[in-house]
Structures are given as C-alpha cells and as structure tokens.
Image (spheres, helix red, strand yellow):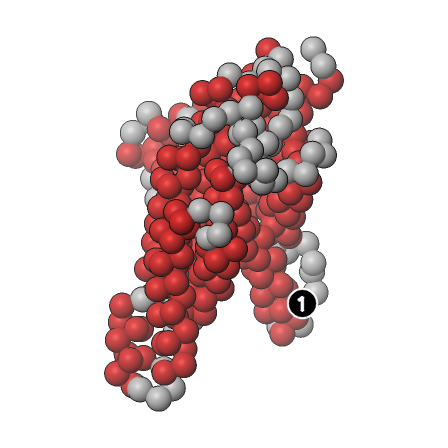
Amino acid sequence: MEWYLLFPITTTILSFFFFMSVTEQYFRKRGLHQLMWSIAMFLFFITAGAEALALGIGEWIPVIYRLYYVLAAIQVPFMGAGVVYLFASRSVINEKNSAIALLLHGFPWVLFGLLFLPRSPVFWLILIPSGLLLGAAIIYLLLRGRSTKIRELWESRVDGYVFAHIFIGFSVYVFIIMNFFAWTLPLNLELLAKGGEISGTGWELTNGDGRALVRLFSPLQTVPGGIALIGGGFYSYIAWQLSLIRNGVRDFKIGFFNVLIAGGALVLGQGAFFSGFGYSTLYISETISVAMMYLGFLMSDKVVKMKFFDAVTMRYLWGGSKQLAH
C-alpha cells in the first residue's frame, strides 16, 4: 500500500464520523443548516472513498470518476448552504440585508457565466437566471430609499430563508446542467488508468482548450459556496469577539470553532486550486480540512462531543422520538 493512500483513507473515515455526528445533531435539533451539512458530509465521505478506491486499485473506473467529480463540486454549496440557513435562523441574514447577500453571491454566478459564455452557448442557461437575480438585487438596493412600497414588498417576500432557498436552488440547478456534460463528454482513459490524483483533468480536451467544458461548472459551485462557508465562519468569530470586547471581555478562545471550520474550508479550497494545476495537494488538504472542520463542529456541540458513541452508532436514529428529545 502506497503511503499516499493513507490520506484518502483517513479522510473517508473522518468524513464518515462527521456525517454521523452532524446527522445525529439534525435528528436532535431539526435545523435546516444541520440537514445541509449532513448531506455535504455524506458527499464528502463518498468522494473521499472514491479517491481511496482509485488509488488502491491503481486506476479510476470511468463511471466512478464521473460521479466523483460532480459530487465533489456540489458538496461545497451544501456546506455553504449550512452557514446560510444558520444565519437565516438567527436573523443574521434577514429581509433587510437579503439583497446584499444576493448581490454578493449572484456576482460570481454572473461573472463566470460571462467568462465562459465564449466557450459554449450553454452558459446562457447560467447567465440569464443569475443575471435576473443579480439585477433584482441591484434595482432594489438603488430604489429602496426612494420607494416605501418597493422596500415593503421586498421585505415581505425576501427574508433570509428565501435567500437560502435561492442559494441552494441555483446550486442544484447548475449541478443538473453540469451532470449532462459530465456523463456525455469523453474521458481521458489513459490518464484515468494511472489512478492517481487527477482532479478535474480526467476529461479529454477539445479545440485545444486548457480546461474541458465540464470543469468550467466547478467554480460556479465552489466559489459561491466558499464565500458562504469561509466568509461566514470568520464573520461569526469576529462578530462574537467584538460583542465580547464591547462587554469588557477578552477571550479569543470563545467561538474559535468558527475559525477551525472556516480555516478547514480554506485549506480545502487551496488544495483543490493547486491540484487543478497539476500539484498533488488535494488529498492532503482534504485530510487536514475535514479534521479541522470536524474538530470545530465537536467544539461547537458539547452534546455530540459527550455522546460521541451515540453519534457514531446512530443510536438516536432508531431509538424513538422520546430518545430524540433528550
């Protein structure tokens, strides 16, 4: 067994425990943000397992590689959606600032749609809906101070939860389009036969371009998801610390789990970025990332930490409604 195989194996094990723990928390608290994180960590577990399998047998099975790549892309928006739904539940994102949140996340959708449109007219399917969303946010921000009716109409219709639905809904929409190309474009079978860390380079290139068409959909998923996940984590920690300082308290350990979660996501993003350019950084970064995020999660939920065995064995899932309430 090659020593490098230890990284995807470790990531698979950690992400499985993470999935179990956050799913236990969801059944205990029933929060949409926990559901999003549960889905994300299940996808993380599947993709890490695919990496371990490919490295272990020495080749990428084409059907597994296609599934691996699309699931690796969509897991980041689900992580980001977890933060967005959490912020919605705590009114951090609300009817008064939902337009700003839409502007922040709609901009990269429109930007990448414009950048990739010369490559394929399919990106009109991205550009039109994202442009409408971004345009609506801009128009509202320009007019809200001039028209009470427009402000009241927006604030009665678009709160934090509506933005969260838009965020994950558009991500799934991109995922569906991405899947069409992922399952129809030809693969580089010679490269897949090597079985190593190939990131998104497993598709054959066309027209001499440096990136296959299916890879262009990845930043439409990972960039907005990363903004929510990384930005949300650091924002939470800074906001928490500022509130403590205003009350005369200085303790940088309080809320530090947010830094671990955001930092873990940042490590993952950097590893995936450099891996896309041929550097073998993805598997190592995934192990570090999931370890940091899982530690942050355990620090944030003392019940899961104290009842780790229950979380891992999923005892709550078959223990009945009375157990779930405890």
Rendering coords of residue 326 (x, y %): 38, 38
Q: Residue at the spot x=46%, y=34% of the render?
A: 70
Residue sticking out furthest to the bottom: 146
Instruction: Give above or below for 99 relative to 226.
Output: below
Neighbours of disc 1 within 10 Å: few (<14), some (14-19), many (20+):
few
Q: Residue at the spot x=35%, y=46% of the render?
A: 173
Instruction: Give above or below for 266 relative to 135.
Output: above
The quarter of the image holding the N terminus is top right
Q: Is residue 36 left or right of residue 151?
A: right
Instruction: Give above or below for 261 relative to 63.
Output: below
Q: Residue at the spot x=68%, y=54% of the render?
A: 253
Instruction: Give above or below for 41 relative to 6.
Output: below
Rendering coords of residue 272 (x, y %): 63, 39
Q: Is residue 158 left or right of residue 182?
A: left
Rendering coords of residue 17 (x, y %): 52, 28
Q: Which residue is mark 1?
A: 249
Residue type at tag 1: Val
Q: Residue at the spot x=62%, y=72% of the render?
A: 247
